[in-house]
Image (spheres, rainbow, N blue to C red):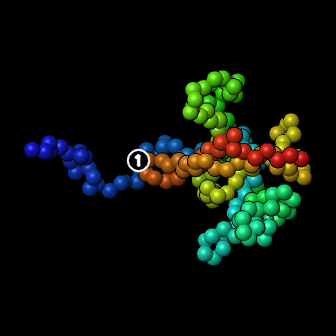
């Protein structure tokens, strides 16, 4: 005979979520904005990045750049196509304010040459934090700008590293509302742009 047990405390699954509650509950969207842009009791901690958004046609598909070879489907990276810069697709870049940090593996960069077992992978990640309403997909790129020693982007802007999102996490509060985004990018996948 099958064991009978309740999956949920009786009755609670039928109860709707109620609004209200404590007025001291933290609004993470507002906290994020205060931290990044400054406000409340916080100075601005944000930095400027570029978000490279792939352009999409009416059918939702990416639009190939004319430099893409019709038979090999390879973009022209040898001659540095001035339109797509080797992406093979049309894109637009926009400035975006966020916050970034490094996530080292097993103690960080100093351990990157330490022996690891065959078949193991040691990943180092860069994490970008963006506002809850940031429109980003796995086909887009996050770009580090070259900064001067004071943290101000060098003008004219120079792209320093180009990151492909590995994992996009939309952090949600208990009611499911997106509060902020974390974009995990692999360091060893990053394209370093030579000047
Ligand atoms: Zn091109």
Residue projecting furthest to the left: 1
Among the 4 quarters of the image, the one containing residue 161: top right
Residue positioned 85% across, 63% down in the render: 82
- Mark yes or no: residue 19 visible: yes
Which quadrant of the rendered structure holds the N terminus? top left
Q: Indicate the quadrant of ligand 1 in the picture.
A: bottom right
Q: Looking at the image, which is closer to me, 172 or 160?
A: 160
How packed is label 1: few (under 14 Cα within 10 Å), some, or many (20 or more)? Answer: few
What is the x, y in percent for residue 14? 26, 56
What is the x, y in percent for residue 27? 54, 47
Among the 4 quarters of the image, the one containing residue 79: bottom right
What is the x, y in percent for residue 193? 82, 47
- Mark yes or no: residue 29 visible: no
Residue at mark 1: 21
Q: Looking at the image, which is closer to me, 162 or 7?
A: 162
How many discs mark residues in the rendered view? Answer: 1
Residue positioned 40% across, 47% down in the render: 21
Residue positioned 85% across, 37% down in the render: 150
Residue projecting furthest to the front: 71
Image position of 14 with respect to 98: above or below: below
Among the 4 quarters of the image, the one containing residue 54: bottom right
In the displayed structure image, the side of residue 131 where residue 70 appears, left or right: right
| Secondary structure of the residue carrying numbered label 1 | loop
Q: Looking at the image, which is closer to me, 139 or 181?
A: 139
Q: Is mark 1 within 8 Å of ligand 1?
A: no
Residue positioned 61% across, 71% down in the render: 60
Q: Looking at the image, which is closer to me, 125 or 31?
A: 125
Image position of 105 with respect to 153: above or below: above
């Amino acid at each position: 005979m099958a064991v009978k047990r309740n999956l949920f405390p009786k009755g609670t699954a039928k109860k709707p979520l109620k609004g209200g509650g404590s007025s001291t509950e933290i609004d993470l969207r507002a906290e994020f904005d205060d931290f990044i842009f400054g406000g409340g009791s916080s100075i601005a901690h944000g930095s400027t990045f570029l978000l490279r958004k792939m352009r999409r046609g009416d059918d939702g598909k990416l639009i190939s750049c004319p430099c893409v070879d019709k038979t090999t489907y390879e973009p022209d990276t040898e001659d540095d196509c001035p339109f797509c810069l080797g992406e093979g697709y049309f894109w637009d870049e926009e400035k975006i304010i966020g916050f970034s940090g490094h996530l080292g593996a097993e103690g960080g960069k100093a351990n990157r040459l330490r022996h690891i077992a065959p078949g193991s992978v040691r990943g180092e990640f860069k994490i970008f934090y963006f506002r809850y309403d940031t429109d980003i997909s796995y086909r887009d790129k996050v770009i580090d700008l070259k900064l001067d020693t004071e943290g101000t982007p060098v003008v004219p802007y120079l792209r320093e590293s180009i990151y492909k999102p590995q994992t996009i996490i939309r952090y949600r509060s208990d009611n499911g509302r997106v509060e902020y985004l974390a974009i995990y990018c692999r360091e060893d996948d990053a394209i370093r742009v030579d000047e």
